[in-house]
């Protein structure tokens, strides 16, 4: 079906209608708005003159203190030219010990990869930057996308969707604004009063603004929300443009305007953070904070990172997207896309993007997938519905039913990945030691560790999986559940090994070192840490039911089969808990956070939630929209003080 046809509108979400371009003399022009994306004479020089130089970014970048970050916000990502030029300026002018360049932007009609590639080919000097952007450019689905470049020194947060929705959902405070986009006469919606108000709400004293337009209505709107505006010479044949500053004189573009309590202030990042738990959640968070310059203590009672629930030889990277495009589905989709990029960039030696089939393993799941396909439209780069013939071709084994094919997913070596992530000069490991008590004292936290002196830190993050509840230093219970999961290791010679990951009631991975891993059981009522023949038999039976022709001859016997048991932690609503810990009164406790409840989807959720938590801890723009972030609040998992009785009289 043509994505632009009216019949597609009812099931367009979450896919977006891409920009409809016409190319004139090699320059892209929007057919919808009848305007060019950049100056025909020299778009790159125009970007530098209008946005980078008029915001005095080279000087401001060069003057940053060690560890300090900078936030640029933009209306209209377009071809990404402004972003790439800013990234180039950051690399040229920012000190090596500076923090992170955050670039926050919105685009309602993003370019396709093909159009973006063609547009950026016009700027050979940006070829290296363009290649990295194109490699990570997200599929055209609505919502917030976080892309990380230069080992974390540059972060791009792009919202695909309506500008007003984006500014309401994104949480950041800008140092400089690029009011770009098509001319006000061509695209008045982008210049509405509520958008200008949103610009003000995301600014602070000293925030600067530059825009190519000199329209009086825009100048008056910005002045009306507190910006002191000036008209200055424009670029090339354009006579005038506008610049401004919030809370000061228009000439004070050095960012030194006096701070006022009227404007939002950024949280100062902690000097040190202790992370309790070194599974995939703890290790992704530790590495994220370490790359932002934070000193990290990684603590675990096991002897090495990734030795508990994250210690399996193989783990499938998948999520289950809901029929309704609600917040759970939005979070799952964002996590899947981010984790695929993350492991490609940070664990390439242990990441195997072979593709993954989510099998419609029974009648119920087949009906659910049919509703999902009928009610949603995803780009092929995210997923594709396939019948049994196509599934068999993709998997290399007989597949009795169709399913959903995720071409960019696959499997990870989680234990190896954890150990690689934990190797960083800013991460100090404390392994083989059990935490016994957490105590606040004089604005810091004291961590009592069995057999060692107390460790003192600015902030603690508890991400110890199913052991997390026992470490929470507040009164009252939390609604967490422990799930025992046993995986079984199958000798490759005993089965017809797939070329890709197959998920259903169990998952089956491709061969690794003569072994295929399958599992895992889902035991809510067992705390047995020993590998059992009964669990092996359950895995064998479920796999046989999912793929009836999988064995080479007889099914293997469970006796003597190798396997592994891990304990996962989930919440009462099966959604993760990630954020500040609250006391019984509902107020945030200073310096302590919780990161747990990822269940069986830890490999998929951990990278994005670690990014979000690191954003929160360092006071930087958030990688998640406000409505999703609010639903991750650990306080929702607290046992109600006065449960409502369901008994009848």
Image: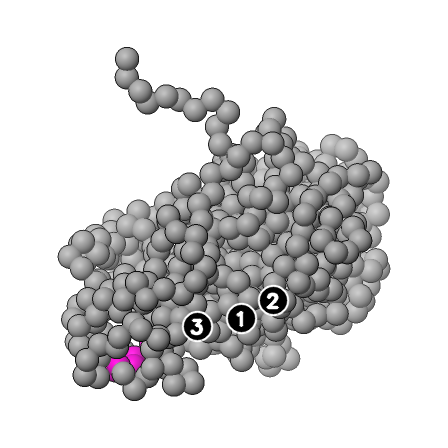
Q: Up-down: is 437 above or below 556?
A: above
Dots 2, 1 in contact, CB < 8 A: yes
The answer to which of 554 and 261 lies nearer the viewer is 554
Q: Within the magenta stretch, is there residue 496?
A: yes
Q: Quarter-wise, where is residue 101 in the image?
A: bottom right
Q: Residue at x 44, y 77 (%)?
A: 352
Identify residue for label 1: 415
Q: Which residues are drawn in magenta? A: 495-500
Q: Residue at x 77, y 56 (%)?
A: 452
> In whole angstroms, how far apart are the C-alphas of marks 2 and 1?
7 Å
Identify residue for label 2: 305
Principal SS element in the magenta part? loop
> In whole angstroms, how far apart are the C-alphas of marks 2 and 3?
15 Å
Q: Is residue 311 left or right of residue 69?
A: left
Q: State the image coordinates of residue 557 (x, y, percent, origin top left).
A: 26, 75
Crowd class of label 1 (few under 14; some 14 to 19; many from 20; radius 10 Å): many
């Amino acid at each position: 079906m043509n994505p632009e046809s009216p019949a597609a509108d009812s099931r367009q979400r979450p896919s977006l209608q891409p920009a409809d371009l016409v190319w004139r003399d090699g320059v892209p022009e929007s057919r919808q708005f009848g305007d060019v994306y950049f100056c025909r004479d020299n778009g790159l020089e125009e970007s530098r003159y209008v946005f980078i130089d008029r915001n005095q970014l080279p000087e401001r970048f060069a003057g940053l203190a060690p560890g300090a970050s900078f936030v640029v916000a933009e209306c209209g990502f377009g071809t990404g030219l402004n972003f790439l030029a800013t990234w180039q300026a950051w690399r040229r002018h920012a000190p090596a010990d500076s923090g992170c360049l955050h670039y926050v932007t919105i685009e309602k009609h993003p370019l396709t990869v093909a159009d973006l590639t063609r547009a950026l080919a016009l700027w050979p000097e940006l070829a290296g930057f363009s290649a990295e952007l194109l490699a990570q450019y997200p599929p055209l689905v609505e919502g917030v996308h976080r892309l990380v470049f230069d080992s974390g020194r540059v972060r791009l947060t792009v919202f695909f969707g309506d500008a007003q929705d984006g500014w309401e959902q994104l949480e950041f405070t800008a140092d400089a604004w690029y009011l770009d986009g098509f001319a006000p006469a061509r695209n008045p919606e982008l210049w509405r009063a509520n958008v200008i108000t949103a610009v003000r709400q995301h600014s602070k004293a000293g925030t600067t603004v530059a825009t190519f337009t000199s329209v009086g209505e825009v100048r008056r709107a910005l002045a009306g929300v507190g910006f002191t505006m000036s008209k200055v010479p424009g670029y090339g044949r354009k006579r005038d443009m506008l610049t401004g500053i919030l809370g000061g004189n228009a000439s004070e573009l050095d960012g030194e305007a006096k701070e006022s309590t009227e404007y939002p202030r950024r949280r100062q990042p902690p000097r040190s953070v202790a992370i309790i738990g070194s599974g995939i959640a703890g290790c992704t968070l530790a590495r994220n904070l370490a790359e932002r310059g934070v000193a990290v203590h990684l603590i675990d009672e096991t002897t090495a990172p990734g030795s508990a629930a994250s210690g399996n030889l193989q783990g499938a990277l998948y999520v289950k997207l809901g029929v309704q495009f609600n917040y759970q589905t939005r979070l799952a989709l964002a996590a899947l896309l981010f984790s695929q990029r993350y492991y490609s960039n940070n664990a390439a030696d242990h990441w195997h993007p072979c593709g993954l089939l989510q099998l419609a393993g029974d009648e119920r799941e087949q009906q659910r997938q049919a509703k999902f396909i009928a009610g949603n439209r995803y780009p092929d780069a995210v997923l594709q519905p396939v019948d049994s013939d196509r599934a068999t071709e993709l998997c290399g084994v007989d597949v009795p039913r169709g399913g959903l094919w995720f071409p960019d997913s696959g499997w990870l070596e989680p234990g190896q990945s954890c150990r690689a992530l934990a190797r960083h000069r800013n991460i100090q490991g404390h392994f083989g030691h059990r935490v016994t008590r957490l105590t606040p004292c004089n604005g810091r936290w004291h961590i009592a560790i069995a057999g060692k002196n107390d460790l003192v830190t600015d902030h603690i993050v508890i991400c110890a999986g199913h052991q997390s509840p026992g470490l929470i230093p507040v009164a009252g219970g939390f609604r967490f559940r422990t799930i025992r999961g046993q995986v079984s290791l199958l000798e490759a010679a005993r089965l017809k090994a797939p070329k890709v990951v197959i998920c259903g009631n169990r998952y089956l991975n491709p061969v690794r070192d003569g072994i295929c891993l399958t599992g895992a059981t889902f035991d809510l009522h067992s705390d047995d840490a020993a590998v059992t023949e009964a669990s092996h038999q359950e895995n064998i039976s479920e796999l046989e039911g999912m793929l009836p022709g999988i064995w080479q001859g007889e099914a293997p016997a469970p006796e003597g089969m190798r396997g592994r048991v891990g304990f996962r932690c989930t919440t009462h609503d099966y959604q993760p808990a990630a954020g500040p810990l609250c006391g019984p009164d509902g107020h945030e406790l200073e310096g302590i956070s919780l990161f747990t409840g990822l269940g069986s989807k830890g490999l998929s959720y951990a990278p994005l939630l670690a990014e979000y938590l690191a954003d929160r801890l360092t006071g930087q723009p958030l990688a998640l929209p406000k409505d999703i972030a609010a639903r991750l609040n650990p306080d929702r998992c607290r046992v109600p003080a006065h449960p409502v009785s369901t008994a009848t009289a």
